[in-house]
Amino acid sequence: MIKIRDLNKSYKMGANSLHVLKGINLDVEDGEFVAIMGASGSGKSTLLNIIGMLDNHDTGLYELDGVKIEKLTEKKAANYRNKFLGFIFQSYNLISFKNVLENVALPLYYQKVSRGKRAEMAISYLERVGLANWAHHLPNELSGGQKQRVAIARALAAQPKLLLADEPTGALDSKTSQEVMRLIQEINDEGKTILMVTHEDDIAHMCKRIVRLKDGMIMSDEKVEQVRAVYTPFDAQL
Amino acid sequence: MFDIDRWREIWASIASNKLRTLLSGMTISLALFVFIVLFGMGNGLQNGFQKEFFQAGALNMSIFGTKTTESHAGYQKGRQIQLENRDLDYIVDNYSDKIKYISGEYNQMLLIKQGGESGRYSVNGVNEGYFNMIDINLEKGRFVSDEDLIGRKKTAVIGRMVVEDLMKGREVVGQYLNMGTGMYEIVGVFSSNTNDDREERNIYVPITTLQTIYGNQDLPRITIAPKDGLTTKELGDFATDIKSDLKGIHKVNPTDQGGIRVWDSSEQMSNTNAFFFVLTIIVFVIGGGSLIAGIVSIGNIMVFSVKERTKEIGIRKALGATPRNIVALIMQEAITITLLFGVIGILAATLLVENINESLADYFIYNPGVSTNSLVVACIILFVAGFLAGFLPARYAARIKPIDALNDE
């Protein structure tokens, strides 16, 4: 699914240049569940951004599902993201003046799916995350956990090959974190490839493989025994 | 592209900051309002002018002979052309469909004596049609008549001020004036409808009488009042045709600037037109200036709007919005605001202008109004204005990098 060879990325700050990623090599197969860990400044977010085509790498190879990703124009990058990727952010990033259903349907809008079909598909993903009843509510009426679940539904709606999560539980309490991780694990069980950046060890162990970054280089890359999130039935009030 | 979602988004964006949108939108409304009102008033002024000044006498045409400036047909240059009775007859024969009244004019300044008083006055030999072409009112007696002309009688019609000057307080019809070349019987007294003192010091006599006295058939000047309803172009063509015909008769080179001169109202009209042209330019400059200010204002709020929505734009891009999608988003909002407030301005102005109608007639403003065509053009201009207002902010929005945007705040 993902093939990365000798990836380098530097940020220019005025006259100086910050070398953030120094020769990253990484392979991710279909259906894997990988956590990327590292301290602040280790380059983990940058790596995720490059994989997510939100940023361009300087040198090296990045292939996604056999397609070489290199020096993309904005337009092409937008198209690829739309078709191949789903994003889950720490701060949910829902659009505040659109209701839940419209938020989930947004990637479909950019895929040029018709209005009726969009609504239909969006509802089914909302059901999957247990929030179908909240379809016409606005994001500010939802709790953090619910918002993240809507964001997950949105990420799934485009039927991407790869889900990218950047500290998905970062803004949630431990109980809600378990809820959200349980959902993400289920999605991986169903076969989705998931890449997750986190700085929390216990969350990282809910994945199946941990890649540790330090100062822009991979320190370790090992498969782990997945810890299943604590199962509680979805509580509509949460 | 213009689905319900897009409209709801535009509305949501406007609603999120109603005051800001309202204030900026009002600059556009005001610009259009000012423009349409000024334009309508300008039209009204033009109508008023035309109504006032294109009345009796304003459209009259004068023809007279001058010196040629080129040699032609065997004649040297510098030859003085003199119009004659046969020229007047020719014009009557060939252009009667365009003529309402026609008269020759033969002016002399003569010393007039009456009783103990005397003075120099302009004595004009005319045909009887002349009295219809000037704005005077017969107070006593009659005008010069056909019989006077045929009989070359020494009759005179005098203005009120002549009576005031020479024969104040006396009954004058039937009296005689010593006009240098003989004694003329006063057959009528007139006054000017426009209180023109100069006109009221004129004395009119039969033109044939003067011609007999000076021993010629000369008509120094021919004046024509054209038929009603001719357009400016038709009048211009009429003047040109007469000029070339008379040039032919008098063997003047068609290209000669001199020889035969026709002074017609198209010159006067072109002066008025020049005035209104300048006025129109001023209106457009004011209107255009206000509109530009309005565009800048809308552009300003669009920039704010984009900055506020940086995160949202980043999300959209992450989800697959191309730069073109983002540009369209911003542009549509700019154009919608501009059109909405612009139309409000246009409606308000049109309402005002259409309701003025008669009330400004004292100020020469008559039937102010704006044609539907102009309004359509105004709407198109609004559309372009919205486009311009949104252009730079849209480009800025399109260039936002998703990761920067998502890290915003």
Image (tube, coloured by chain):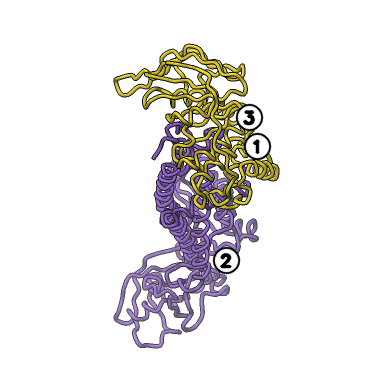
Chain colours: A yellow, B purple
Amino acid type of the residue that numbered disc 1 sits on in the rendered structure: Lys
- Which residue carries the number 3 mark? A189
Q: Secondary structure at mark 2?
A: strand
Q: CA distance from mark 3 to mark 1?
A: 29 Å
Residue B31: x and y in percent read 43, 55
Residue at position x 42%, y 64% in the image:
B107
Residue A148: x and y in percent read 52, 41
Q: Which chain is indicated by disc 1?
A: A
Residue at position x 57%, y 70% in the image:
B150
Q: Is residue B207 visible?
A: no
Residue B165 drawn above or below residue B36: below
- Which residue carries the number 2 mark? B101
Please report whichever mark, 3 or 1, sits nearer to the chain's N-terminal start.
1
Amino acid type of the residue that numbered disc 3 sits on in the rendered structure: Asp
Q: Secondary structure at mark 1?
A: loop
User: For the residue carrying disc 2, how many other residues have a C-alpha within 10 Å: few (<14), some (14-19), or many (20+)?
Assistant: many
Q: Name the disc covering residue A15, or none.
A: none
Amino acid type of the residue that numbered disc 2 sits on in the rendered structure: Tyr
Residue A96: x and y in percent read 50, 48
Residue at position x 53%, y 64% in the image:
B103
Residue A99 drawn above or below residue A64: below
- Which residue carries the number 1 mark? A112
